[in-house]
Amino acid sequence: MDDRSLSNIDQPSLFCILSKRLFAGMFNFRKIFALWFLVATTMSYTSVSMAVPKVKSWSTENGVRVYYVHAPELPMVDVQILFDAGSARDKKKKGLSLLTNRMLSMGAGKLDATGIAENFESVGAKLGRGALRDSAWLSLRTLSKEKYLSKAVNTLATVLNKPRFLKGDLAREKKRIVATIRQQGASPSSIAKRAFYKELFRKHPYANMPIGTIKGVKSLNKKDLQKFYQQYYVGNNAVVAIVGAIDEARARKMVHTLTSTLKPGSKAAALPKVKPLTKSKLVHIPHPSSQSHIFIGQTGTYRGDPEYYLLYTANHPFGGGGGLTSRLAQEVREKRGLAYSVYSYFSPMRRRGIFVIGMQTKNSNTVKAINLLNAQLNKYHRKGMSRKEFKHAVSNITGGFALRIDTNKEIVQYLGLIGFYNLPINYMTEFTKNIQKLDRKQINAAFKKRIRPQAMVTIVVGGRKAPVLSAP
Amino acid sequence: MDDRSLSNIDQPSLFCILSKRLFAGMFNFRKIFALWFLVATTMSYTSVSMAVPKVKSWSTENGVRVYYVHAPELPMVDVQILFDAGSARDKKKKGLSLLTNRMLSMGAGKLDATGIAENFESVGAKLGRGALRDSAWLSLRTLSKEKYLSKAVNTLATVLNKPRFLKGDLAREKKRIVATIRQQGASPSSIAKRAFYKELFRKHPYANMPIGTIKGVKSLNKKDLQKFYQQYYVGNNAVVAIVGAIDEARARKMVHTLTSTLKPGSKAAALPKVKPLTKSKLVHIPHPSSQSHIFIGQTGTYRGDPEYYLLYTANHPFGGGGGLTSRLAQEVREKRGLAYSVYSYFSPMRRRGIFVIGMQTKNSNTVKAINLLNAQLNKYHRKGMSRKEFKHAVSNITGGFALRIDTNKEIVQYLGLIGFYNLPINYMTEFTKNIQKLDRKQINAAFKKRIRPQAMVTIVVGGRKAPVLSAP
């Protein structure tokens, strides 16, 4: 797994979008940069943001909130159903959220896993599913023509409403997840990620990995899953996002088929607030790898944070923006060749998510690299971005946004995000405008206020000996 | 990765089919068994095999062989383009085939990786690609309506015909592949698989893993890829499989768009024959895992082998058939609880592929497990299957076949298999009939002749000490 996917751990929507882009590779920045250049030199920003889709929203009798965009261009429909049922709800049953979500498609009603898969495939439809810290979701891409759509939607309704949680299926899936956790235990990037979350969030539910622990997963039984399902997979805890070639009447009918038999239930309780770190900590985990994985960070911002746009933009010239033109990239990669990639980002969640600086380097360069990252952070924290960096960041972010919502898959994921985090319904329309409104001094002030260089967690996985750092 | 995917390493078609089923899990056998039961008790076999699709085939001027099935039920088209350009063609450049295949979608014509991905996504199309030992391929699922199809097909044509192989992209992909090989180096199942192929195929090109070696991948450069591409991605070395809602005229036009600018080139040279093992060998690779991964096997059968059906059926009661009712499953799993799953299979390739028996067990049970597997193999080799097992195997295989070709994705993969391995064009129609024609004594004789229990390679990964086996 690419380390950069760390950024997306609690953003089902952006996760998918960015995964796609990360899959496409580092070359994203080229396109974004090219577009920025185009925008900055020949076009007005408005022409780029014109394609932003019109969102309609309503709620059902049993409390499901629905977000819908009519997109008639492709004869397809994308649906995402999200529940506030991510691993932050696991409590002591580590891995319960993910396993519950996964088991939904392993048997429902009269269908076993193969039957479910074949039902979807027979109409060319594709099921997705997942669980991260905040949310757990099912998704569907189907043809919009009624005869295909109805079979796909009916099957999804069965999967969502009539899970079997059979003991044999459960034993098999537990075994698979345990095997994956074991594999991750040998991967330096997984080890580093687990340690980073543990140190940052300590007793907060975000400290745990959605996949759980071997002990936790082994202990889960059918009753745990049923209980979790009955509590969290309920109307008042659900958001449905729909984009595609169906009119509102059909969209409403689809929502009815999918969710009308869900119990209203209750919205999941508010998560505890994340307590910011108060002092720095270095954790070294020896590993027989030649490269060391380095994460430096602290808790950052949350969805709906009034300062979100400021912080998001503040990060851009520092370690964001696709990874080649940022200060970190220039200092670490271009000038010193210490790493192939280096980056920083905020990952907003329901509560404060991570702010992280990440890179890999040869074990012998670890100390040098960490000192450099800290020096850069301190400098940026003190002085902030330059006018030139500010202009570039705003152009780049606003120019690139249209590309992030130019496919139905991306739009449905943004809709899910808007619904799940109660963002303004015009989030997509306003994003670019909100960035354009920002003032450089405000941005620098927000970063200075929020980021505390004196309270950073540093995780190093790799090498035998703990790095000895110079005094800060 | 599920160990059972080992079975599919050189069957791009079956690979995908079985992956889907394996993904759906062990429960496949239930459906197959249920169907078998239904078939055996209430229906005639013919009614099950009636849905077999009608295949049409032709060749283009530049030598591309095309296999086409008209399937108007879904407004979609599935295409697979295969080349005899798998890792068996790597020679000393380990990993060249896979890297070349992967780089195709990383930049082509004027498009970078993101541009390619977005071109497909903008019309709801999905690109696939892969390379195993025998073949390398690209695949596409697209809507059949002209305006979507033409954009998807034009993009695929660019990907196939105008790869850029840019140095920056290449460096990034090499880094990713090297990281994956490193990860595999820590996974007992990957270690076992690599060792198994190495011992079985020794100096034969099949000995190498398609992903290559760290040293091999690091050494590859742009020229290597260009040369490989120019030699193997040519008309006479290509097969196109098409299934979907397009008539023959449009299918021909599509093939023209995709392949008419490929140089005719030459068919890849015949691969050397695989030399069967002459004596047994035990390889123990210590690993700090609590479970040991065990593979026991030798080289087996090839595509087009006159004895293929006999051997395939012979394996069914032994360790095949979905994994619960076989002798191995009964002895290892049900009676002794030594493993959650145990299986055996033949994996036919251009030349003889593997015959393997596989399982995982606690380190302390390794010797017991290996002795048991060998005892079962010896017994089955000596006496063969019973009448009851014979009846069950034939019913199960013939009953299950219809399920393997009940979606367009599965059919296109079979078409690719038929074209790539020059199987009879009526392969799908005849499969069931060919199994029904078999005679129990012939089956037992074929297994007895082909399998040599005195010349098996045994790979054990796990535990500190090599297992000491009792004399055979």
Image (tube, coloured by chain):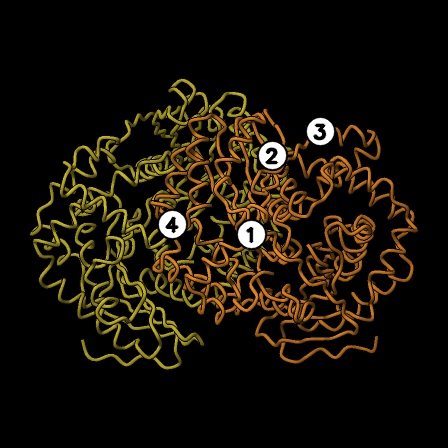
Chain colours: A yellow, B orange
* Within-10-Å neighbours for mark 3: few <14, some 14–19, many 20+: few
Looking at the rendered image, the disc whose residue lies closer to the viewer, 3 or 4, is 4
Looking at the rendered image, the disc whose residue lies closer to the viewer, 3 or 1, is 1
Residue A39 visible? The answer is yes
Looking at the rendered image, the disc whose residue lies closer to the viewer, 1 or 2, is 1
Compute the Cα span from label 3 to label 1: 29 Å
Compute the Cα span from label 4 to label 2: 29 Å
Numbered label attached to residue B107: 4
| Chain that bears disc 4 | B
User: Measuring 33% from the left and 55% from the top, which residue is drawn there?
Assistant: A26
Secondary structure found at label 3: loop
Point out residue B60 in the picture as x, y percentages from the top left corner. 58, 38
Secondary structure found at label 4: strand
Compute the Cα span from label 1 to label 2: 20 Å
Rendered-image quadrant of the N terminus of chain B? bottom right
Q: Are marks 3 and 2 on the same chain?
A: yes
User: At label 3, which amino acid type do we have?
Assistant: Ala
User: At label 2, which amino acid type do we have?
Assistant: Asn
Rendered-image quadrant of the C terminus of chain B? bottom right
Instruction: Give the residue number, with chain letter if any, for mark 2.
Output: B408
Compute the Cα span from label 3 to label 2: 12 Å
Instruction: Give the residue number, with chain letter if any, for mark 1.
Output: B136
* Within-10-Å neighbours for mark 4: few <14, some 14–19, many 20+: many
Point out residue A254 in the picture as x, y percentages from the top left corner. 46, 24
Give whichever of discs 3 and 2 has the lower sequence position. 3
Q: Are marks 3 and 1 on the same chain?
A: yes
Instruction: Give the residue number, with chain letter if any, for mark 3.
Output: B51
Point out residue A377 in the picture as x, y percentages from the top left corner. 18, 65
User: At label 1, which amino acid type do we have?
Assistant: Ala
Point out residue A389 in the picture as x, y percentages from the top left corner. 13, 54
Q: Are marks 4 and 1 in contact (CB under 8 Å)?
A: no
